[in-house]
Image: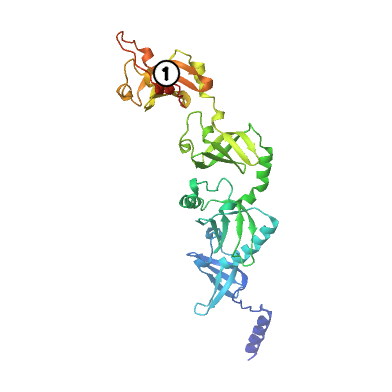
């Protein structure tokens, strides 16, 4: 009897000294420590009084399970009490949602720059899924580097461009937060606002900068650098005649450009002016009456073009093909054929060069002189571009 009475007394003392059992309430965010991680599920010790379970779908997409360790403290939300399992059902994702909303409100006030990764795209912009809450980077809030420069604003091409940005890290600022967390807007433009303003202030004509091709349209190349964007007009891409800018560059390609014009925020750039004018190069190597060897690049109804150095096209007029009457130029020369021609007209400053095949041939003594029409005379003045 004495032993039993002592046992009861000891039990009463231990019970009195033990911590109060606190039953977590549904929706409450509580702290616990990790017991075990198995098959993307997490067992959690709650106050050394309960065991909780975070199933894989409640872990969220901002947590890397490889970085979690047994004994580590985490915050979780109580979803319900599973009597059958004898477990608390918990959510790490929903606890993080509350924390993220609080942080984003703070970022909106502090203007802090954060990094996010888009998880989806639609025609209006990029969606960012943070632990099940989807927030937005509108197209209008993208920097020039990521803005979709698409010919004729083709919606399919715009969406394809935005899809290519999914998973890319973006530095952004929060520019709008509502209390329910349903409308949170990120801005990439706002994140570079100060740097962009400083770069524009320091930029001057004649500067040479390195940038990235951000868009290719029929009228030129868009190049971004230091948060700014400028246009290399089609006429400033190369000294030769450019019909398709996409043959000279690819989106995301690095390129050096020269600033040739500044009008408020409109920046004009040039690639060709970083290279020596090929007409000047040609003038150093050749003079009137010299011969020149090059392939035939194309044939038209009034003559053939030779592909000279630096993209220059030299014209062999129809009347300079042969001493005889030429009905079809292709009977005399073919595209791709390398020929030797004499320079019979050379005006580098006017970007003109006239070439002749017949000037290197001996004219037959009995050959009748071909009549020249007014149209032929006019065409002789045509220049090769």
Left or right side of 210 for 356: left
Crowdedness near tag 1: few (<14), some (14–19) or many (≥20) residues, C-alpha within 10 Å: many
Q: In the image shown, does 129 or 376 lie closer to the viewer?
A: 376
Q: Position of residue 211 (x, y in %)?
A: 57, 39
Q: Position of residue 312 (x, y in %)?
A: 46, 25
**Pointer 1 residue:** 355
Which residue appears at 60% of the width and 51% of the height?
188
Q: Position of residue 28 (x, y in %)?
A: 62, 73
Quarter holding the N terminus? bottom right
Figure check: 136 above or below 7: above
Q: In the image shown, does 41 or 385 lie closer to the viewer?
A: 385
Residue 196 visible in the displayed image: yes
Residue 280 visible in the displayed image: no
Q: In the image shown, does 263 or 140 lie closer to the viewer?
A: 263
Work out which residue is located at the far bottom of the displayed protein and give it. 1
Work out which residue is located at the far top of the displayed protein and give it. 365
Identify the image quadrant of residue 231. Answer: top right
Q: How many marks?
A: 1
Which residue appears at 47% of the width and 33% of the height?
242
Which residue appears at 69% of the width and 40% of the height?
201
Which residue appears at 29% of the width and 9% of the height?
366
Figure check: 124 above or below 213: below
Figure check: 66 above or below 362: below
């Amino acid at each position: 009897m004495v032993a039993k009475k002592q046992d009861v007394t000891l039990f009463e003392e231990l019970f009195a000294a033990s911590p109060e059992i606190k039953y977590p309430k549904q929706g409450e965010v509580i702290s616990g420590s990790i017991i075990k991680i198995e098959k993307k599920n997490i067992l959690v010790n709650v106050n050394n009084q309960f065991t909780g379970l975070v199933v894989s779908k409640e872990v969220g997409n901002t947590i890397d399970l490889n970085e979690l360790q047994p004994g580590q403290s985490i915050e979780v939300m109580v979803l319900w009490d599973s009597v059958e399992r004898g477990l608390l059902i918990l959510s790490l994702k929903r606890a993080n949602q509350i924390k993220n909303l609080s942080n984003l409100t703070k970022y909106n006030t502090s203007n802090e720059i954060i990094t996010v990764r888009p998880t989806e795209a639609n025609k209006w912009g990029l969606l960012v899924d943070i632990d099940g809450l989807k927030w937005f980077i509108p197209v209008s809030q993208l920097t020039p580097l990521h803005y979709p420069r698409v010919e004729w604003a083709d919606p399919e091409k715009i969406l394809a461009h935005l899809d290519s940005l999914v998973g890319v890290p973006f530095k952004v600022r929060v520019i709008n937060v509502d209390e329910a967390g349903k409308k949170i807007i990120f801005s990439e433009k706002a994140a570079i606002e100060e740097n962009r303003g400083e770069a524009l202030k320091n930029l001057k004509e004649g500067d040479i900068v390195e940038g990235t091709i951000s868009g290719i349209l029929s009228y030129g190349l868009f190049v971004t650098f230091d948060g700014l964007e400028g246009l290399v007009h089609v006429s400033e891409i190369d000294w030769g005649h450019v019909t398709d800018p996409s043959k000279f560059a690819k989106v995301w390609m690095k390129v050096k450009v020269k600033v040739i014009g500044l009008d408020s925020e409109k920046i004009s750039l040039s690639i060709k002016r970083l290279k020596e004018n090929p007409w000047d190069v040609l003038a150093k190597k050749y003079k009137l009456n010299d011969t020149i060897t090059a392939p035939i690049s194309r044939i038209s109804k009034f003559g053939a073009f030779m592909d000279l150095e630096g993209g220059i096209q030299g014209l062999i007029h129809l009347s300079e093909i042969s001493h005889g009457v030429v009905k079809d130029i292709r009977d005399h020369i073919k595209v791709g054929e390398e020929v030797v021609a004499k320079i019979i007209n050379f005006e580098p400053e006017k970007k003109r060069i006239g070439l002749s095949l017949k000037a290197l041939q001996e004219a037959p003594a009995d050959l009748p002189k071909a009549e020249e029409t007014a149209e032929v005379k006019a065409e002789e003045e045509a220049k090769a571009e």
